Amino acid sequence: VLLEAGANVNARDSAGFTALHLLASDNNLVGVQLLHSYGCSLEIRDSIAQATPLHIAAYNAAQSVVEWLVKQGVDLYAKCSSGHTASDLARNNMHMNCSYYLDCMAEKDEIVPHLPVNVKQKKIFVFNYITFAKHNNNKELLISDRDG
C-alpha cells in the first residue's frame, strides 16, 4: 500500500538498512522481487558496513535471494567496508554452498583459485563448475551463463 502511494522504495531505517537489505537477510525472494518491481536499487549499500543486498544475503545463507540477485547482474566483486566480497562473507560464516555458487559465477572458466585454507579444517574443498553442479544437482548451471 505504501509503495503504491509513492513511498520511497530505498528509504532507510534508523540503523541505515533498507527494506531490501532486511528482506535479503530473511531470504524473502517474493519481497525482494516486489521491491525490485517498484524500482529499488539492487546495489544500494547500508549505512554501517557499506554492504549490498548481495553481501547481506550471502552472509545469511539466503541462497534463493543470492541466486536471483546474481541473475539480475549485481556486482559480484563489490566489497563492503571490511574489504570482503559477498563470497568472502558466506565462506567466513561456513555457508559453503552459497560461497561456491558465487565463486563459480564469478570465475566461470576456472577452478576457484582463491579459497583460503584453514589448517584446522578437516576437509578442504575446491570446486569447479562441474563439481559444483553435480554436488548441488544443478544441471542448469552448466548450460546457462550469468546473464541468462
Image: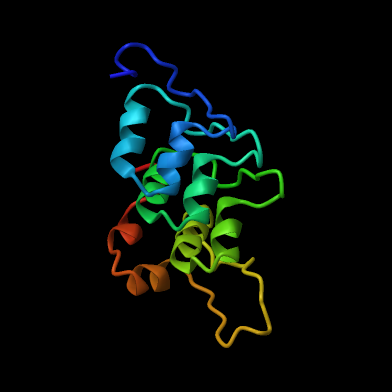
Residue lying farthest to the right in this orientation? 82
Residue lying farthest to the bottom in this orientation? 122
Q: Is residue 129 above or below residue 62?
A: below
Q: Is residue 58 above or below residue 34?
A: below
Expressed as whole percent of the image width and height from the top left, the position of residue 72 reads: 40, 38
Expressed as whole percent of the image width and height from the top left, the position of residue 32 reads: 36, 37
Count numbered badges in the picture.
0
Residue lying farthest to the top in this orientation? 5
Expressed as whole percent of the image width and height from the top left, the position of residue 60 reads: 48, 55
In depth, the one of 109 and 105 nearer the eye is: 105
Residue lying farthest to the front in this orientation? 14
Is residue 87 found left or right of 2 in the rendered image? right
Expressed as whole percent of the image width and height from the top left, the position of residue 132 reads: 41, 69
In depth, the one of 66 and 56 nearer the eye is: 56
Q: Is residue 41 above or below residue 144?
A: above
Q: How are the residues colored?
A: rainbow
Is residue 70 found left or right of 33 in the rendered image? right
Q: Is residue 107 above or below residue 6?
A: below
The quarter of the displayed image where residue 143 is located: bottom left
In which quadrant of the rendered image does the N terminus lie? top left
In which quadrant of the rendered image does the C terminus lie? top left
In depth, the one of 65 and 136 nearer the eye is: 65
In depth, the one of 121 and 135 nearer the eye is: 121
Q: Residue at x 44, y 17 (%)?
A: 8
